[in-house]
Image (cartoon, rainbow, N blue to C red):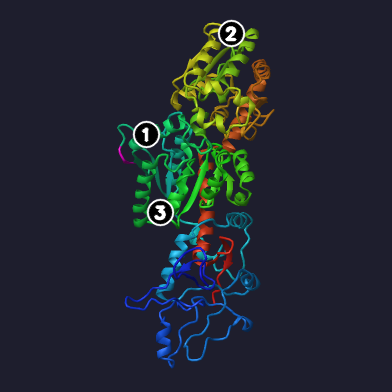
Amino acid sequence: MPDSGGGGNRYRAPGLPFVFQPRRRRNAARRPLPGRQQHRLGPGHRSPGQMAAHPGRARPAVCAASVHVSQGQASAGAGAGSGRRRCPAPVTRAFRDQHQHQPTALRLRGTQGRHAHRRARLQLAGPLPHDQAHRQLDSGLRPGPANRWETGSPAMNRLSAGPMNLALIHQPWSVIEPPVNGADSVALLTDEIARRLAARGHRTITYSRLGRGQKRLSHFQAVEYRRASVSIDRWIKLIIQELDRRGWRDPTRPFFSSPWCYRQFIGQVLKDLSRQAQQQPLDVVHIHNFSQFVPLIRRVLPDACIVLQMHCEWLNQLDATIIQQRLEQADLVLGVSDFLAGKIRRRFPNLAGRCRHVYNGVAIERFATCNSDRPHSHSQGRILYVGRLSPEKGVHVLLDAFAIVARHHRDCHLELIGPESVVPYEMIIPFSDDPLLLSLAEYFRPGAYGRLLRQKLAALPPGSVTFRNQGMDHTDLVQRYHAADVFVAPSIWQEPFGMPLVEAMAAGLPVIATRGGAFPEIVQEGQTGLLVPPADAQSLAEAILRLLGDPPRRREFGQAGFQRAAANFTWDHVADALIQHYRAIRQARGQQSTGLAHDAAVGRRALTPVDQNA
């Protein structure tokens, strides 16, 4: 049957999900092939002329696939003496649906068939039925006795146990210098997880940006830290930003979501991944935030499992058509909260089965112990904020609330710790439909929010606020958590997670947060802290006054918060959860590559076991 999508003498073999181009001998006459299919996919292939010249010889296999065809589907031969006969009619989807219960799979024969199968597998590497695989792993069910790759079988246990080869690709705008001890939460997560995965016996490689004075390759605690340069990427970014400023680009497709964003970085990573795969195949490639890396890695590593972990809402904000194409090539999409993963599932319902959430963690042993004791004097209330000084974080609302608190507690003190790092305007405002956030659009301009905070600070009592806008490492930060009485997270936008919240809870500190995003998943209202409406300075001030005036309740919230952090938000929990997900998708891909047929009609791999006796 001719393929309507291309030119030339291309034919689609019956039941095969790819187009086959028959090879011609160098001196063969270039005559048009008949409308019916004449090429053979096997070592016994003979041209129609050879068959006519030697009619007594045994004819080769009729087609490349072993299929059952009823007599009604067989067609009569060509004219007498032609030496030709028709192949069975192409296997239609209706025929497959009718006979899919039969224990027969389409198989390729001969050397050409093996090469053709390999080309088809490389071309059609795509999504796997991860929702079904996860349900099987979670419930302990087996696909069926006909499948030799069932859960619990010796063959599948080799995939679900033993060390794996893992590659973690950090977002390329920040560096990783182990052990990470700074304010970059994604760099902290990548480093903490990599070291714990390596400690569990898995070979772990991290890829990050090459910083000043760093080596391209270093080792720390059995982790390989590989780094790529971004010197050219900086110039590309400046050029594209100028095009955006002049309005020459589509605003719904910003540069940070383009495949050209950090093209030099990912090019070096792909080259190194290819070398690593030649030496030892990679089982899982774990990408943070940059969905445009997924199709590039899939092209280089067609058999590897690809995990995309999101720490922001880009998948819900960018062009749905482009994001859909990228997610279809990923094996697993992780959100750092159920709030974030749920939004991805609702926007892409056909991919909901591969969306999961894994919370971020905290070094519980580091934050739980400290040399300084929390002050027991009730004459002074110490309020702490840790995070970026950016409009969506609501620090200006906290200053307004503190002005109300200071009128009742004249000796209270507020400490702000975090870098003055405002998210670029083009990365948040054009994609937001939140009126609270849109009302702050002018403060996302360079320097505008810093001026607003300093104006509000000037109106407060002198010495009542400590402003540390350079941030600090975790060694000093733990001391500040233990010196405070209340921690406040006044975010206005829908936070995907909240690392400072779990750090405060690990330090035994009661927390006050806004009700929205992932905060209700972290803070149990009335048990570990209080939740207030966002952008409401009066409600925030009342919650602060309530806790400052009730020391027993503060201690109760602090103890419950520590227990919750230790039970749910540790890096060991995160590493164990990731390993379970890695094994699940690896097992699903192992089933496909070893004993599952590809359903080309719907463009996905179906869980159809191959008959062992076929």
Mark closer to the observer (3, 2) = 3
Dot 1 and dot 3 residues touching (CB under 8 Å): no
Number of the label disc, if any, that sits on residue 411: 2
Residue at 58% over, 83% down: 75
In the picture of the structure, the residue carrying the numbered disc 1 is 234
- Is disc 2 placed on a helix, strand or loop? loop
Q: Amino acid at mark 2?
A: Asp
Q: Is residue 419 left or right of residue 151?
A: left
Question: Visible in this render: residue 282?
Answer: no
Question: Secondary structure under badge 1?
Answer: helix
The spot of residue 508 in percent (x, y) is 58, 27
Q: CA distance from mark 1 to mark 3?
A: 25 Å
Badge 3, how many Cα within 10 Å: few under 14, some, many 20+?
some
Looking at the picture, does residue 465 appear above or below residue 523?
above
- Work out whether residue 182 can be spotted: yes
* Contact check, label 2 and label 1, Cβ < 8 Å: no
Depth order, front residue of 116/394: 116
Task: In this rendered view, identify the residue nearer to me: 364 or 523.
Answer: 523
**Of the image marks 2 and 1, the number of the one nearer the N terminus:** 1
First to last magenta residue range: 215-219
Dot 3 amino acid type: Val
Q: Is residue 449 above or below residue 358?
A: above
Amino acid type of the residue tagged 1 in the rendering:
Arg
- Residue 512 colored magenta? no
Inter-mark Cα distance, 3 to 2: 62 Å
